[in-house]
Image (cartoon, helix red, strand yellow):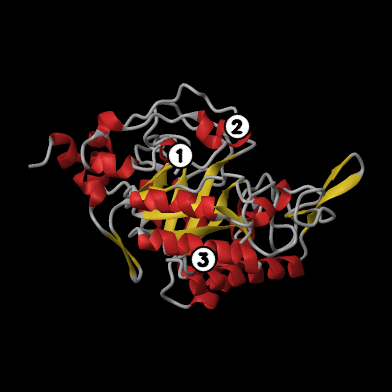
Amino acid sequence: MSTPEQALAAPLFESFTMGPVTLANRIVMAPMTRNQSPNGIPGDNVAAYYRSRAEGGVGLIITEGTYIDHPGANGYPDVPAFHGEQSLAGWQRVVEGVHAAGGKIVPQLWHVGRERRPGVEPDTSVPGFGPMAISEDGVEVVRAMTEQDMLDVAASFARAASDAQRLGFDGIELHGAHGYLIDQFLWSESNQRTDAYGGSPENRLRFPRMIVRAVRKAVGPDFPILFRFSQWKLSDYTAIIAETPEALGELLKPLADDGVDIFHASTRRVWEPGFAGSDKTLASLTRELTGKPVIAVGSVGLDKTFRTGHFTRTEDPTSKSRVNVEELAMWRSRNDFDLIAIGRALLSDPQWANKVRDGRLQELSDFDSSALEELVS
């Protein structure tokens, strides 16, 4: 006989069909940068880290950002690559472990764009690439992308997606959020080009659409493509790529037409309205505008709102796990989301999903900022 907590949580543990893949439940592990892959190679500790979340009941794991083979794709030390024999062999072990534990997994394919600076691995001589050139102290540190650069990057994403399919991943996610390359073209503040790739929403979409189309062509019609987007940026919480729901639809609907199967609507607070004057969340609006399934994410499972402390390693050490299953079940019953992503709460507690499913909320391990420095398995 189920407890009241189990009954409330039940809608979160219904299966979900993602193309040819069936997920055991609606719980997703959000992508979180870990900086634990020296030389871009995910090791056995990374494989154990992801497998433990599958064993802990997560239906779908989205990996941390993993950079494609374009020379300017990476911007950070010790993040994993998604190219090269050793890195792909590491990812093969990750996939095998997750599948052995009954989970599903997709890699988040990543190009950091203008966030890169010369001096960063793997080739320290390579500058950043972005919609516009950036100079610091008279030195160009970010190169304004040419059309050939864009074609090269789209081909790089396509190769990575094809490799993911070959390795047995269950789909891929394109990182189009948080001020990285794809998002830099979508955001008018970072994209002030005066050619066919800047200005109007249609023009700012041209390069992201090129990427989605290249990936879809590479993997065929049935391999799931997820697309993560956000209004906020790491450098600006108040940033917006769309001022109205209608404007958001103008950006997202063409991407859906080009092959995106699921949108991942990244917000700081998942429960807040997506736009002033509306009672609908960004996730529910995305679902309504595109007709596609949506993943909601943003401070779920915590009592402290998401901050960039996750990235700067200055996260509030007093954050506690807080799960309002009644609230989550209500959002699910209203079709506010199809899948719900959990971030930091899963860093300290690999068994988070199983505990929520079983109504063992008192057993949840509180988030500990020390988990940012290690891979808790």
Task: Left or right? Give the position of 291 relative to 330.
Answer: right
Secondary structure category for the residue under label 2: loop
Disc 2 residue type?
Arg
Disc 3 residue type?
Gln
Q: Which residue is mark 1?
A: 347
The residue at 21%/48% (across/down) is 11
Query: Disc 2 or 3, which lies upstream in sequence?
Result: 3
Q: CA distance from mark 2 to mark 3?
A: 29 Å
Disc 1 residue type?
Leu
Q: Is residue 220 depicted above or below 352 in this figure?
A: below
The location of residue 192, given as percent across then percent down, is: 72, 50
The residue at 61%/51% (across/down) is 183
Q: Are marks 1 and 2 in contact (CB under 8 Å)?
A: no
Label placed on residue 313: 2
Secondary structure category for the residue under label 3: helix
Secondary structure category for the residue under label 1: helix
Q: Which residue is mark 3?
A: 92
- Visible residue check, residue 226: no
Query: Disc 1 or 2, which lies upstream in sequence?
Result: 2
The location of residue 165, given as percent across then percent down, is: 49, 72
- Which residue is nearer to you in this view: 183 or 288? 183
Task: Left or right? Give the position of 225 relative to 6.
Answer: right
Query: Disc 1 or 3, which lies upstream in sequence?
Result: 3
